[in-house]
Image (spheres, rainbow, N blue to C red):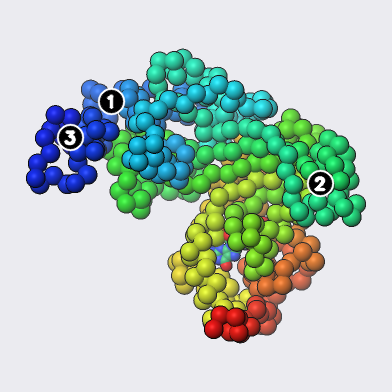
Amino acid sequence: MTVLENTPDEKPTASSAPWCSPVTERYNTRIVLTTYPGQSAVNPVPLKWGEKDPQERGPILVSRNGKTLNRRNAIGAHGGSYAFYSALAIAAGDLPVNFKPDFTNTQPTFDFPPQEAWGDPTKIVSMDPFGHDVVKHYKKHLEDGLDARPTIAITRATMRVSEVSDAVKIGRVPVDGEIVLNPSGDVRVTKVAVEPVWYLPGVAARFGVDEGLLRRALFEHTGGSYPELVTRPDIKVFLPPIGGLTVYIFGPPGRVSDPNFRLALRIHDECNGSDVFQSDICTCRPYLTFGIEEAIKEAQNGGSGVVIYFRKEGRALGEVVKYLVYNARKRGGDTADKYFQRTENIAGVKDMRFQALMPDILHWLGIKKIDRMLSMSNMKHDAVVEQGIPILERIPIPEEMIPADSRVEIDAKIHSGYFTTGRKFTEEDLKQVKGRGWECWEDVTH
Ligand SMILES: Nc1nc2c(ncn2[C@@H]2O[C@H](COP(=O)(O)OP(=O)(O)OP(=O)(O)O)[C@@H](O)[C@H]2O)c(=O)[nH]1
Ligand SMILES: [Zn+2]
């Protein structure tokens, strides 16, 4: 191991950095900077990605706590981006370094039937197919003191979305007592939260790139945070510090994997400004609530409805870049012909969502075909179809749901290849599609 001497008996000297002594109180072992295969202390628990028997596959162990450090078979940390809050909590003294969670009563509220894809190393490469049943499958490892943790949680809830409540009030969505519970529009839902777990050879294959190149890029562009990406080619699994996804299932969850039931599906990427705060610059929330409504109706008609919400804010460019783009658009004349160019000028690309990994969750759920896909995105469509899941019908957002200032976005998307049943646009048409200017703001901001 590459270690940095920092033993508890080490006396801080005048030249010690001021943070040295609290470090020795909280971490009383040497710092392991990185490890190499074949070192005497390195003894990973076998992990065979793609084995359909969870015992054969083995648990995913990523923690550096206690005895798990030497038995790790994965790089990164649990919790996606929230791992950094755990680190803060430990540094602040709120969380013990070797805290062991108590998983009593945390088991899934629904047992998803195992799917063939769970044992296929090419079909699922960005989540752990056994991540919801870690306590059941890896009890022995937990009892041995190894820090295995769930990366999927399955629960149920009642939700209320104002647009759906409005649809119930005007009778567009009936109250059935099972899915829509009452005239206020309370809706029953099963939810699945998933944290990312990447099988690096599989992720590299999805993008058609070399695994070594992928590892190098991940190492370099995370500030050199994960040296084992380079020093431990024997470890194939990485838990990246990024957001995951949530699945919302309307109707009995057992129907989702049964091709005899019709399926309506909305795959949605996060847009906090619209999804939560209802900005009118894009179609995100309207399409999301339309998707929820259609999913509910499909379930009420005896089928199944699924909405999958990915944490890929601003096309995975983040909200800061997105707002910079908004400014550039509004100051430079907001026309549809320049829409994507503005993003490319600032981010270098127009989109970083890489839908190639998105279909994993569909395989995990056992979805074999999609009857009604509530999306116009050609990228989502192509990624799903390339994974062997046919889409029988594509449903664009209804015209009347498109907010005032989002015409620029939707027309630019249609021009760039998004699905439409309406009219297509020429470059000349796009120049005429203008967003709202900022002139009207002058009075209130000055
Ligand atoms: N960078 C950037 N991102 C944007 C902008 N407008 C919307 N977004 C993001 O684009 C994404 C839109 O995702 P979705 O609502 O799933 O829509 P889509 O993939 O474009 O296609 P549909 O499925 O047809 O709705 C979200 O992540 C938004 O935050 C913009 O001007 N710049
Ligand atoms: Zn949006």
Which structural element holds mark 3?
loop
Q: Is residue 57 visible?
A: no
Q: Where does label 3 land, which residue?
A: 6
Type of the residue with mark 3: Asn
Query: What residue is drawn where x is 86% and y is 46%?
Result: 183
Query: What residue is drawn where x is 50% and y is 59%?
Result: 318
Name the quadrant of the N terminus: top left
Query: What residue is drawn where x is 73% and y is 39%?
Result: 158
Which structural element holds mark 2?
loop
Q: Where does label 1 land, which residue?
A: 42
Task: Specify which label sits upstream in the sequence, 1 or 3.
Answer: 3
Name the quadrant of the C terminus: bottom right
Q: Tell which of 418 and 139 is nearer to you.
A: 139
> Is 402 rendered above or below residue 366?
below
> Is 430 rendered above or below residue 79?
below
Q: Tell which of 171 and 73 is nearer to you.
A: 171
Q: Nearer the viewer, mark 2 or mark 1?
A: 2
User: For residue 129, which quarter of the picture?
Assistant: top right
* Position of residue 296 measured from the top left corner of the image (x, y, whole percent): 79, 44
- Binning the other alpha carbons within 10 Å of mark 1 as few (below 14), some (14 to 19) or many (20 upward) gives some
Q: Where does label 2 land, which residue?
A: 185
